[in-house]
Structure formats: C-alpha cells, structure tokens
Image (cartoon, rainbow, N blue to C red):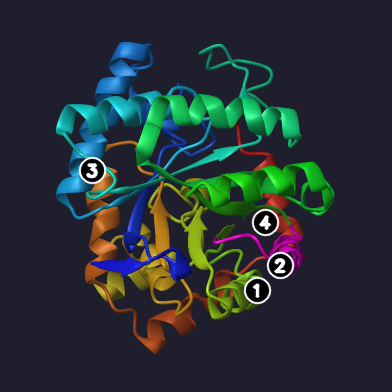
Amino acid sequence: MTTTLGRTGLAVSRLGLGLAALGRPAYIDIGHASDLAGQTDVESLERVAHTVLDAAYAGGVRYFDAARSYGKAEAFLADWLRGRGLGPSDVTVGSKWGYTYTADWRVDAPVNEVKELSLANLRKQFAESSGLLGPNLRLYQIHSATLESGVLDDRGVIDELERLKHNGLFIGLTVTGTEQAETIHKALRVGIFDCVQATWNLLEPSAGPALADAHASGAGVIVKEALANGRLTARGDVAGLAEAAGAAGATPDALALAVVLAQPWADVVLSGASTVAEIESNLAALRLDPTADVVDRLAGTQEDPAVYWHTRAALPWN
C-alpha cells in the first residue's frame, strides 16, 4: 500500500520503519532489552537490524527513517541497501540531524544523546549522513524542533536548509512535547518545510488539527511513536485496548496503528519494531479498518498531554 509524501512526490508506503530501536543497544521502548536478547554487540545488532529490514521490505515497507543519534542506524541501513541492491527508485530514506549519540554503545550510559540544533551541527551531521547514505537520502529533518529551541528563528540554519533544498534534498522537521501543534504552525509560516513528523497516538492526539493543517498546505505528514514506545502494545497497560483489539480480531499494536493509519492527513505511520514478530504484527494494521464503534471504545484512552509527555520522559533506557 503506497502513497505520495505530500508535495515531495516521493513514493512511500503507508507503514514505514523507524530505526530508533535498531541502531543502538538501548532505547526507551518497553521490553527493548528482551527484544534484543543480548544481541547488543555491533555485529549482532546489525544482523538483527537487517533481518527486520528484510521482513519490513517483504511486507511492503518502502519508507525508512533514521537519525544521526540512532547509533549506527544510518550505517546499518546503508549496508542493507547496498547488499540488497536497493536505491532511491526502490525505497525512500529520511534521516534527521540535531542529536548526537553519546552512550558509547553502553546500555547503562548516564546520557544517551545530546541535543544541539546549531548551524555548525547541521553542517557536520549532514556531511556524516550524506556520506553514509549518499543519493538514498531524500528527506533530511530537524530532530525534535521545539519553540524553546529557537531553531525555527535561526536564520543561519534556515538559510542552510534552503541551500540543501535548492540542491535537491527535501527538508522536514520532527516535533515533540506539549507544544507540537504550535511548533508545526510556526514551521508552516517559515515556509521551507516539505514534511512534518509528529507524535500522534491514542494516548496523545493533540497535534491532530495541526497535522491536518500541514497536510492541507501540501506538506507530507509522518507519524512517529504511534504505539507510544510500547505502551499501546500487549506489553502496555492501557485500559480497554486489549479488549477492543480482541473484539476487532486484532492484536493491540495492530489496532492502535490502524487507528492512526485511518487519519485522513497521515501519509506514513512509523513502526518502531525491533523484531521480525513485531514488524509482522504491525503490518497487520494495513488489513484493518477500525469501525466507528471500536474507535469510540478507545476514545477514553486519551491522556492530558502534560501527563503523557511526563510519562514518556520517565521511560527507562533498556
């Protein structure tokens, strides 16, 4: 199932694969440590990543999302593309700049990543990303832009992004936190962004109207954290989700993803799978069409955005 990513014209799959949990030994997804089952050395984790990438591609996934801060995700993805003979005409690849991975491959690192949305870091990290991904890199995104960061007011950054865009790269941003909607609207006023990526899920749907505005403007819309870092899976404890999934003949993750896929403004919804079983379960969402009754049953799962983001911030790296 494919679509076009807004005005970029890029062909993408409705379900994409984000590599946050596959490029480094620790992440905040619930159960991440058990998913990797000790396969955390670089060589073993690359094998795991390639196996999940193979399963995703076999299931029709054609959009892959990485970042400089995802450990070796870009390198793993680049090696996989090269090994399978895949290029820009076969898949669409997006990556992000703004965070630096600092954990040194430790699961118990006190600090896993450091944010710096400066012009110098943009130039440095773009050189690194493009050096690894080459012409496969089609979409380059600010990683977790916020109003507080000031990145959307930084003329040097905006001018550099415009230069990259002039040279044929599509430019996007990801947003985070309780002010996602406000950040999206400011980005639309800046006017250079081809794509917006935001968190939207059953627990935190507050960015929906802003994402609808972005879509209406012609921007592509990518949804991240559709499963709330594992909270909206069988491992989570969200009241009513398991029962609704059972009534729909689906797994909790597939139903939660299907609700996001059903949003008329969503072009790509990212899976954060770190095992073949997870990506195969996530892919089942493409075959679901949640009824209004099921969606109504799930309306009560919504949390206050401040509560949601506080809970997310407290999730342990594992």
Three-letter amino acid code at disc 3? Answer: Ala
Give the residue type at disc 1: Ala
Quadrant of the rendered structure where residue 43 is? top left
- CB under 8 Å between callouts 3 and 2? no
* 193 within the magenta span: yes
Locate the N terminus and report the quarter of the image it occupies. bottom left
Q: Which mark is residue 210?
A: 1
- The residue mark sitting in front, 4 or 2, is 2
Dominant secondary structure of the magenta stretch?
helix
Task: Return the x and y of residue 186 as percentages of the image width and height.
Answer: 76, 65
Q: Earlier in the sequence, mark 3 or mark 2?
A: 2
The residue where tag 3 is placed is: 277
Instruction: Please tell me which of labels 4 and 1 falls first in the chain.
Output: 1
The numbered mark, 3 or 4, whose residue comes first in the sequence reads: 3
Left or right: residue 156 versus residue 85 is right
Disc 1 element: helix
Q: Which residue is mark 4?
A: 308
Secondary structure at badge 4 equals helix
Instruction: Find disc 2 in the rendering and name its residue.
Output: 181
Front position in the image: 151 or 113: 151
Q: Is residue 185 left or right of residue 45?
A: right
Q: Nearer the viewer, residue 193 or 313?
A: 193
Going from the N terminus, do you reach mark 4 or mark 2 first?
A: 2
